[in-house]
Image (spheres, rainbow, N blue to C red):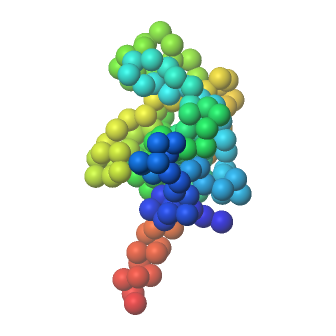
């Protein structure tokens, strides 16, 4: 089962104030992984729930099911381990950290995400998984585009 980031209308619900709407996390059967990771926000590491599907990397506050940010896998340019030369703010605290660079023309306008796992094995698994799923998403989109062009 696949839930695209553009076709998540069934996952919309009103916020507590009833004024705004928010995306819920996709259904559990779409998840490839679910982790609590550090995310570098405003110069500080903050813990977020990170759910990876075949279409997106979704971010939510721990204990909540509302997406606060997301990265479409199609728009991931690179996933790499972080070094002190890469990290703009908190250079002392990059053990088990990695970066996700996004397309400048995409949903995140070229933003680079800084994430930190709790163990080296988790970092390796997540980097590999996100890179593999991003490659597959791009191949699916390319095949769909070629098929549509041939019609």
Task: State which quarter of the image contains the N terminus.
Answer: bottom right
Residue 129: x %, y % from top left: 61, 45
Residue 6: x %, y % from top left: 44, 62
Indicate whether 25 appears above or below 142: above
Indicate whether 20 appears above or below 114: below
Residue 118: x %, y % from top left: 65, 23
Residue 72 in the figure: left or right of residue 36:
left
Look at 61% across and 32% down and name the residue there: 62
Q: Quadrant of residue 127?
A: top right
Look at 40% across and 52% down and name the residue there: 75
Residue 42: x %, y % from top left: 38, 22
Q: From this viewpoint, is residue 132 visible? A: no
Residue 30 in the figure: left or right of residue 115:
right
Look at 51% across and 61% down and name the residue there: 8
* Farthest top residue in view: 92
Task: State which quarter of the image contains the C terminus.
Answer: bottom left
Indicate whether 123 appears above or below 107: above
């Amino acid at each position: 089962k696949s839930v695209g980031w553009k076709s998540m209308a069934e996952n919309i619900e009103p916020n507590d104030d009833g004024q705004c709407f928010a995306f819920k996390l996709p259904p559990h059967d779409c998840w490839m992984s679910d982790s609590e990771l550090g995310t570098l926000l405003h110069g500080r590491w903050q813990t977020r729930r990170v759910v990876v599907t075949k279409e997106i990397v979704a971010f939510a506050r721990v204990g909540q099911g509302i997406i606060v940010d997301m990265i479409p896998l199609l728009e991931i340019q690179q996933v790499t381990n972080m070094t002190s030369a890469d990290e703009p703010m908190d250079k002392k605290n990059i053990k088990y950290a990695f970066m996700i660079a996004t397309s400048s023309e995409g949903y995140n306008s070229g933003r680079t995400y800084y994430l930190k796992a709790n163990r080296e094995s988790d970092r390796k698994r997540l980097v590999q998984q996100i890179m593999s799923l991003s490659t597959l998403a791009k191949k699916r989109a390319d095949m769909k585009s070629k098929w549509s062009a041939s019609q």
